[in-house]
Image (spheres, grey):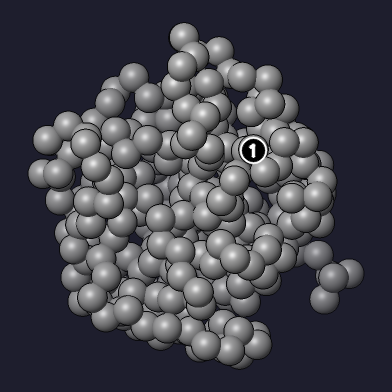
């Protein structure tokens, strides 16, 4: 494998609808398909935190080869034929467990059967279509808060030095009950307000506010009635050292309130925080 490249970046990708896999009209597809221009380094492995794996305690999948999980219903038949047979990353899974436990996360479960859910394989099939990079998934705990996930990320920050690309996959605004019923691509005001608040807070480095989003953000509970799609963001921020420089890599809202806002976080070496 040669020398491991030390990475400085983590990412949060809003994956929106599963049809992102096949629907050319979804704008973020173009961004993900030209991923190697955004991120030219080939990672040694990928740690992906998906909003579609929500467990009581942090869990990692420890498998040799990832099955493709079709965790959605009533979509076009072609969606159920896509395979993303990326190798598993069992060594990385063990390393994640070790780092979390060293940082005071008591119990970390190993799932020896689970493959990749669509929060993982749909964006990865566009970003790394060769499916040749080992992937490990880490779950979210939707009954915990933003700070829990931020601290989880901080515990995992050393993985970047081992060449691991850490990606959170969710949606910046995610309230499925509110979707549709809106013509064209006009965003409903509450969704736009939350999305704009989030972009501003991140670009201004107000990570404490983002950790306490449920108290600080406008329409917080409407944007994320169940925060499983939001917490991968907090992991990505923490994993970039906790006080990173944020870049917006894509933003648009579809179906009235489904936000595709996606971010790159770059670790800033800051001696004063040592």
Quadrant for the C terminus in the image: bottom right
Q: Is residue 62 left or right of residue 246?
A: left
Q: Is residue 266 left or right of residue 88?
A: right
| Residue 132 appears anywhere in the view | no
- The residue drawn where x is 43% and y is 30% is 28
The residue that mark 1 highlights is 222
| Residue 18 appears anywhere in the view | yes
Q: Position of residue 16 (x, y in %)?
A: 43, 37
- Relative to the observer, which residue lies in front, 37 or 224? 224
Q: Answer above or below: position of 98 versus 235.
A: below
- The residue drawn where x is 52% and y is 55% is 228
Question: How many numbered discs?
Answer: 1
- The residue drawn where x is 82% and y is 46% is 216
Q: Is residue 87 left or right of residue 11?
A: left
Q: Position of residue 121 (x, y in %)?
A: 29, 51
Q: Position of residue 123 (x, y in %)?
A: 35, 44
Outermost top residue: 183
Quadrant for the N terminus in the image: bottom left
Q: Answer above or below: position of 130 versus 25.
A: below
Outermost front residue: 177
Which secondary structure, mark 1?
A: helix
- Relative to the observer, which residue lies in front, 138 or 33? 138
Q: Position of residue 190 (x, y in %)?
A: 68, 26
- Relative to the observer, which residue lies in front, 239 or 271? 239
Residue density around tag 1, few if under 14, some if 14–19, many if 20 or more, within 10 Å? some
């Amino acid at each position: 494998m040669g020398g491991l490249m030390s990475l400085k970046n983590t990412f949060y990708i809003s994956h929106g609808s599963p049809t992102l896999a096949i629907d050319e009209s979804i704008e973020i597809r173009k961004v993900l398909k030209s991923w190697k221009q955004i991120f030219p380094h080939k990672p040694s492995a990928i740690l992906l935190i998906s909003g579609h794996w929500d467990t009581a305690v942090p869990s990692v999948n420890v498998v040799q080869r990832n099955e493709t999980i079709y965790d959605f219903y009533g979509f076009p038949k072609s969606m159920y034929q896509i395979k993303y047979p990326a190798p598993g990353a069992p060594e990385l899974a063990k390393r994640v467990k070790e780092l979390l436990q060293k940082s005071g996360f008591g119990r970390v479960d190993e799932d020896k059967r689970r493959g990749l859910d669509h929060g993982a394989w749909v964006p990865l099939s566009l970003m790394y279509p060769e499916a040749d990079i080992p992937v490990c998934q880490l779950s979210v705990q939707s009954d915990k808060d933003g700070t829990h996930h931020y601290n989880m990320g901080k515990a995992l920050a050393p993985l970047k030095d081992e060449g691991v690309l850490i990606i959170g996959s969710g949606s910046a605004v995610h309230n499925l009950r509110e979707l549709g019923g809106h013509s064209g691509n006009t965003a409903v005001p509450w969704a736009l307000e939350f999305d704009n608040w989030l972009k501003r807070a991140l670009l201004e480095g107000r990570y404490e506010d983002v950790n306490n989003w449920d108290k600080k953000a406008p329409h917080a509970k409407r944007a994320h009635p169940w925060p499983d799609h939001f917490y991968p963001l907090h992991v990505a921020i923490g994993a970039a050292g906790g006080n990173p420089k944020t870049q917006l890599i894509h933003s648009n809202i579809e179906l009235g309130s489904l936000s595709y806002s996606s971010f790159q976080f770059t670790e800033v070496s800051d001696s004063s925080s040592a």
